[in-house]
Image (cartoon, grey):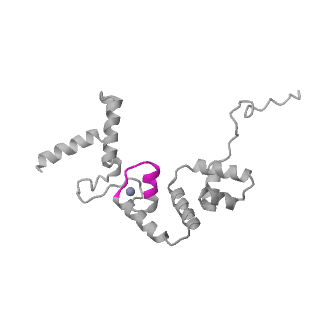
Amino acid sequence: MFAKTAHALAVTYNELWNQQPELHGVTRQAANRFRNYARAKGWPPPAAWDDDVIDDPAALPEWTGCCGTDRGWWMHTLQKLPMCELCEAAHERWNAKHRGLEKGAFQAALMKSRASASSRGSDIAEDGRELMRLGHSYDTAAGRLGVTLNHLQQELHRHPARPRGRSPTAVGKKPPEPSTGR
Ligand SMILES: [Zn+2]
């Protein structure tokens, strides 16, 4: 490639990498069609590339922030991102390592790995409270949710209980204290 061509491409990339097509006259429908096309082809977005290696044909994209681990594989899966080679290989290694487990233990390990990739901490906290309200201990609630006891406790701490119910009277303001006239 001529240096001039490489430079022109780099300049164009710098201008376009973070632009929303819809803000430049492209219809939402057309933009979505191309997003779906890129997704189907497994093309990583600019954010998956390290600027220092983007020109290296051997470089691999970093989709999840932890590609090459089983957690990364779950992040691709939960966020519906195209799978990358490193995570595919990591998940195969995970499966090979856990293959010997009996079914229940395998399932538990799988859910634990999945929970490690979930960003839905508030869901875990809410479900945990619900299970404990139903009489489960911390331990069994964590087991039911497929997270460690430590993880459940962290999420409970991070996401304090909110008043339940949609009715405004249920969570309405406290009535004013009667004045004592002091
Ligand atoms: Zn990956």
Question: Horizontally, is 4 left or right of 57 in the view?
Answer: left
- Residue 20 in sight in this render: no
User: As rendered, which of 64 and 175 lies closer to the eye?
Assistant: 64
The residue segment tinted magenta is 73-84
User: As rendered, which of 128 and 51 lies closer to the eye?
Assistant: 128
Q: Is residue 67 above or below residue 102?
A: above
Q: Is residue 69 above or below residue 132?
A: below
Q: Quadrant of residue 28?
A: top left
Question: Horizontally, is 149 left or right of 182 in the view?
Answer: left
Q: Residue furthest bottom?
A: 100
Q: Quadrant of residue 73?
A: bottom left
- State ligand 1's quadrant: bottom left
- Is residue 74 shown in magenta? yes
Residue 152: image location, x then y, percent: 63, 57
Question: Horizontally, is 182 left or right of 58 in the view?
Answer: right
Residue drawn at (35%, 48%) of the image? 47
- Is residue 1 shown in magenta? no
Residue 167: image location, x then y, percent: 71, 31
Residue drawn at (17%, 46%) of the image? 7
Residue 149: image location, x then y, percent: 64, 61
Tally of numbered discs: 0
Q: Residue furthest left?
A: 2
Residue drawn at (39%, 62%) of the image? 68
- Residue 28 in sight in this render: yes
Question: Horizontally, is 143 left or right of 119 in the view?
Answer: right
Residue 44: image location, x then y, percent: 32, 49
Q: Is residue 43 above or below residue 169?
A: below
- Identify the image quadrant of the C terminus: top right
